[in-house]
Image (tube, rainbow, N blue to C red):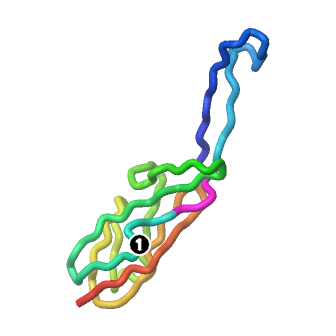
């Protein structure tokens, strides 16, 4: 993910091109998922959220961002929707993963009886 930051300069002595603006971009360096730990009962649901840490130190919520993909390593234990809602299927542990702009984050999710 690229984020463009546009900063306008009011000082006449600074020349940043014809528009008087400068740009910089930040990329996703890590993704975290909450809540951590993840635990749901069988047939219960849990809304997960994802947060990207950018290489400039800023953070951005990703739960509703376009291009975010969620997956479960074992859909026999739990499934996860495109919106990050985990549904417990059978008791056990599975890894829930979110991917965005080439970066991924994951955590184990325990499904109880």
Residue at the far top in the pictured view: 12
Relative side of 15 to 67, left or right: right
Quadrant assignment, res 12: top right
| CA neighbours of label 1 inside 10 A, class few (<14), some (14 to 19), many (20+) | few
Q: Is residue 28 magenta?
A: yes
Q: Is residue 103 magenta?
A: no
Relative side of 94 to 31, left or right: left
Q: Which one is in front, 49 or 98?
A: 49
At 44% from the left and 60% from the top, the residue drawn is 50
As drawn, 15 above or below 87: above
At 43% from the left and 74% from the top, the residue drawn is 96
From the top left corner, tell me how far across and down residue 83 is, in percent: 35, 59
Magenta region: 27-31
From the top left corner, tell me how far across and down residue 111 is, in percent: 31, 84
From the top left corner, tell me how far across and down residue 105 is, in percent: 53, 68
Q: Secondary structure at mark 1?
A: loop
What residue is shown with label 1?
A: 36
Quadrant assignment, res 42: bottom left
As drawn, 85 above or below 72: above
Relative side of 75 to 90, left or right: right
């Amino acid at each position: 993910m690229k984020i463009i930051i546009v900063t306008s300069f009011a000082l006449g002595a600074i020349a940043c091109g014809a528009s008087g603006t400068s740009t910089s971009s930040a990329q996703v360096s890590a993704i975290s998922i909450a809540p951590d730990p993840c635990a749901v009962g069988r047939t219960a649901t849990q809304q997960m959220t994802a947060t990207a840490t950018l290489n400039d130190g800023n953070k951005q919520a990703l739960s509703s961002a376009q291009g975010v993909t969620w997956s479960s390593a074992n859909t026999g234990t739990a499934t996860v929707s495109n919106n990050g809602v985990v549904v417990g299927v059978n008791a056990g542990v599975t890894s829930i993963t979110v991917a965005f702009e080439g970066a991924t984050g994951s955590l184990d999710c325990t499904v109880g009886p």
